[in-house]
Image (cartoon, coloured by chain):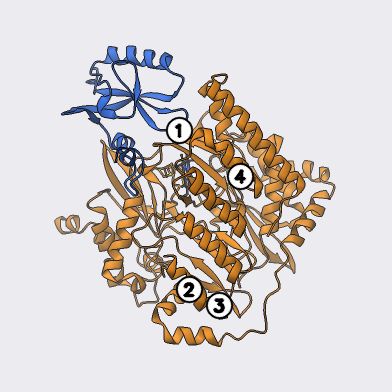
Chain colours: A orange, B blue
């Protein structure tokens, strides 16, 4: 776990102080809203439907128990007792008062947290695989690199006024759990001739123009990371369009100019920039890496209790089957705690639940917690001998839902219930789908299934990369939901295809039910996932399930 | 041909707490949509907007929100306005809770 340096601390405290002054000047009338708005956005403060919203960064999803407790404290003291974890490994508070936000930022600064660069046309929170450092399939821990990028990009004078926001994600495993190809820069660690480096892709993104990132460099040695990123940003700064907000992202430049052209620009810049790096970045990386040194794990405990609990308790077994992931140490497991209880708001945790998670991470998880881009919480280091006790404690806190990767583990953006940009609601659709399939008791039968819902084309809910994507639209003042099929947010990333006309809010749940029943009817056997079946058969059988009436009429 | 003007109210968010507020015919910012001034004429809307912008530095993001005449005053003219007037649907928070 990374501990902030004195420099980091002073910086964050200073930023909070400056924001306090800015708020005071706004309230006294010395600043107009026009002057103030960019300043508040620079500090993660939006104005949404019902209130302000504060977006706090959780760099690469990594959070300590004390930080988690601090979020709980903030939720209780200045908000409504809960927080919303997002796909960008941030947490959002939906109800702060402007006058309280400086106190909230001070409180965060005490535990090394902040809201800097969670908004604005700058390099946003760097995201990474939520299983980093623990996953069995990992080539290298991506967190030291993500932290290096965070330090380099925070307040970097050249990158505060980019043409548009800029997102970077890092994955250390061949299995991509960070959706790297939907980012402006996606870094995937690979090993080549024994050396570790990155496959670098650029120009990915969701939003109104969903595009899969293209590989700009097959293999980038670790020592070239920062100069190469700087070269990409510099090239983007020169070619990124500033005349049209909708065409300003790097993805549009890659699409319009072509990846070869972008590669030439980047490599030319890289040749200029490389000599300017004197190696001090590698010293910083070295220091950071030491902080992420693998924790000492216990080799002398029996895991017999785990096997016994599995045999004795079907509830535990079901949870273990879905919510555990293979650890690099055979006696340990990676635990994903679902924030998707059937009928609950995806990604929300109450302050009480945050405290329980912090305590459990200390008791059973060597004090390490992660927030996943799928809006769940991960305990990456739990000994198998502790799993039954952990599960019992999670049950008491209403946190033991056994649905990771299943149909009710839905990503949903805040939608029209909170978001000023929304065109339809997302949360109630997610709630109803989860409840419906819980009633049908089909969830485990269906197996791996990613449903993702966004309340507008900005695609915060990642609907383009959902096996089933749902996009909420406004049709003459009525909520309407469009379905996309075959999206994939992993190393085989694909953008889903639109299935046909949208559904009203009363039609969408039955439509999803028909679609899923249609899949169950056509799959080869229980091991063929929805996505595999879709790839084998193409869209027709799925469209037929979604639109049975049209089929008959034809 | 000019489009028919749909009725509106003047709305904004409160600077201090972000709460949704509406402008009354007496130039006061209030919490409840039903107390707002319903404007049915385009010229009047322009005139009242100009006034509202000048009126208060506590109102952020002043805009014309679609509304309809109802039995007890204006009602939301768009789903978004219904959420702004009542609160979210997943929790009993926002205006609906303030009123309870
Ligand atoms: C309620 C407050 C929110 C606002 C106002 C907001 C605003 C936006 C906007 C304007 C975009 C489009 C950017 C573009 O043109 O590329 C966007 C994209 C995005 N947002 Fe949000 N968002 C909100 C909440 C969230 C939440 C809760 C999540 C996670 C669940 C999230 C994650 C994302 C992601 C992943 C994208 C896609 C960006 C891309 O790759 O193009 N946002 N957001
Ligand atoms: S997808 Fe649209 S509605 Fe949903 S959070 Fe993003 S901007 Fe808001």
Instruction: Determine if marks 1 and 2 fall on one subunit.
Output: no
Residue assigned mark 1: B17
The answer to whether one can see residue B90 in this image is yes
Q: At x 38% / y 16%, what residue is drawn?
A: B52
Report the disc number at residue A107.
4
Instruction: Determine if marks 2 and 4 fall on one subunit.
Output: yes
Q: Earlier in the sequence, mark 4 or mark 3?
A: 4
Q: CA distance from mark 4 to mark 3?
A: 33 Å
Q: At x 41% / y 68%, what residue is drawn?
A: A401
Q: CA distance from mark 2 to mark 3?
A: 9 Å
Q: Is residue A540 left or right of residue A333?
A: left
Tag 1 and tag 2, C-beta contact below 8 Å = no
Q: Earlier in the sequence, mark 2 or mark 3?
A: 3
Report the disc number at residue A44.
none
Q: CA distance from mark 2 to mark 4?
A: 31 Å
Residue A516 horizontal/vertical position (percent):
30, 65
Residue assigned mark 2: A391
Residue assigned mark 3: A386
Residue A72 horizontal/vertical position (percent):
52, 52
Question: Which image quadrant for residue A136?
Answer: bottom right
């Amino acid at each position: 776990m990374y501990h902030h340096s004195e420099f980091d601390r002073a910086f964050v405290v200073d930023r909070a102080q400056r924001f306090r002054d800015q708020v005071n000047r706004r309230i006294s009338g010395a600043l107009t809203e026009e002057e103030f708005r960019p300043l508040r956005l620079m500090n993660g403060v939006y104005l949404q439907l019902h209130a302000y919203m504060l977006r706090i960064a959780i760099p690469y999803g990594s959070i300590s128990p004390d930080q988690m407790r601090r979020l709980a404290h903030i939720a209780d003291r200045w908000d409504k007792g809960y927080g919303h974890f997002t796909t960008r490994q941030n947490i959002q508070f939906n109800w702060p008062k402007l006058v309280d936000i400086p106190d909230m930022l001070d409180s965060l600064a005490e535990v090394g947290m902040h809201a800097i660069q969670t908004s604005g046309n700058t390099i946003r929170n760097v995201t990474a695989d939520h299983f980093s450092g623990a996953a069995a399939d990992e080539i290298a821990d991506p967190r030291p690199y993500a932290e290096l990028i965070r330090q380099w990009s925070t307040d970097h004078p050249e990158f505060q006024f980019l043409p548009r926001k800029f997102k970077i994600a890092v994955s250390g495993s061949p299995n991509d759990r960070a959706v790297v190809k939907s980012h402006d820069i996606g870094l995937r660690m690979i090993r080549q001739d024994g050396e570790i480096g990155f496959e670098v892709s650029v120009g990915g993104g969701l939003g109104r123009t969903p595009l899969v990132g293209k590989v700009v460099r097959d293999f980038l040695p670790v020592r070239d990371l920062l100069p190469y990123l700087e070269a990409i940003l510099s090239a983007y700064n020169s070619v990124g369009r500033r005349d049209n907000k909708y065409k300003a992202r790097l993805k549009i430049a890659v699409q319009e100019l072509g990846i070869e052209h972008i590669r030439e620009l980047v490599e030319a810049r890289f040749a200029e920039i490389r000599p300017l790096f004197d190696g001090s970045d590698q010293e910083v990386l070295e220091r950071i890496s030491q902080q992420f040194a693998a924790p000492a794990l216990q080799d002398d405990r029996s895991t017999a209790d785990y096997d016994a609990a599995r045999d004795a308790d079907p509830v535990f077994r079901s949870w273990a089957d879905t919510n555990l992931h293979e650890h690099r140490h055979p006696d340990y497991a990676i635990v994903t705690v679902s924030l998707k209880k059937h009928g609950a708001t995806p990604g929300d945790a109450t302050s009480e639940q945050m405290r329980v998670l912090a305590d459990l991470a200390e008791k059973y998880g060597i004090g390490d917690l992660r927030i996943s881009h799928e809006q769940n919480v991960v305990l990456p280091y739990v000994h198998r001998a502790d799993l039954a006790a952990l599960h019992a404690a999670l049950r008491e806190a209403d946190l033991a839902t056994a649905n990771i990767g299943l149909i009710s583990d839905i990503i949903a953006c805040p939608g029209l219930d909170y978001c000023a940009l929304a065109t339809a609601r997302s949360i109630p659709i997610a709630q109803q789908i989860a409840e419906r399939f819980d009633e049908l008791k089909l969830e485990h039968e269906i197996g791996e299934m990613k449903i993702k819902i966004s309340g507008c084309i900005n695609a915060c809910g990642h609907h383009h990369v959902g096996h089933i994507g749902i996009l909420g639209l406004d049709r003459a003042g009525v909520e309407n939901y469009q379905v996309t099929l075959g999206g994939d947010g992993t190393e085989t990333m694909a953008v889903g295809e639109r299935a046909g006309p949208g559904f009203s809010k009363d039609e969408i749940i039955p439509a999803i039910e028909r679609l899923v029943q249609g899949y169950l009817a056509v799959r080869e056997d229980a091991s063929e996932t929805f996505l595999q079946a879709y790839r084998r058969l193409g869209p027709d059988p799925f469209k037929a399930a979604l639109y049975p009436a049209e089929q008959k009429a034809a | 041909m000019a489009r028919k003007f749909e009725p509106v109210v003047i709305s904004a968010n409160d600077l201090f707490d972000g709460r949704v507020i509406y402008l009354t015919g007496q130039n006061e910012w209030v919490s409840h949509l039903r107390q707002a001034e319903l404007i049915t004429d385009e010229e009047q809307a322009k005139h009242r907007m100009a006034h509202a912008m000048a009126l208060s530095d506590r109102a952020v993001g002043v805009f014309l929100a679609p509304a309809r005449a109802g039995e007890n005053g204006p009602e939301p003219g768009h789903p978004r306005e219904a959420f702004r007037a009542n609160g979210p649907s997943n929790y009993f928070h926002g205006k609906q809770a303030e009123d309870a």
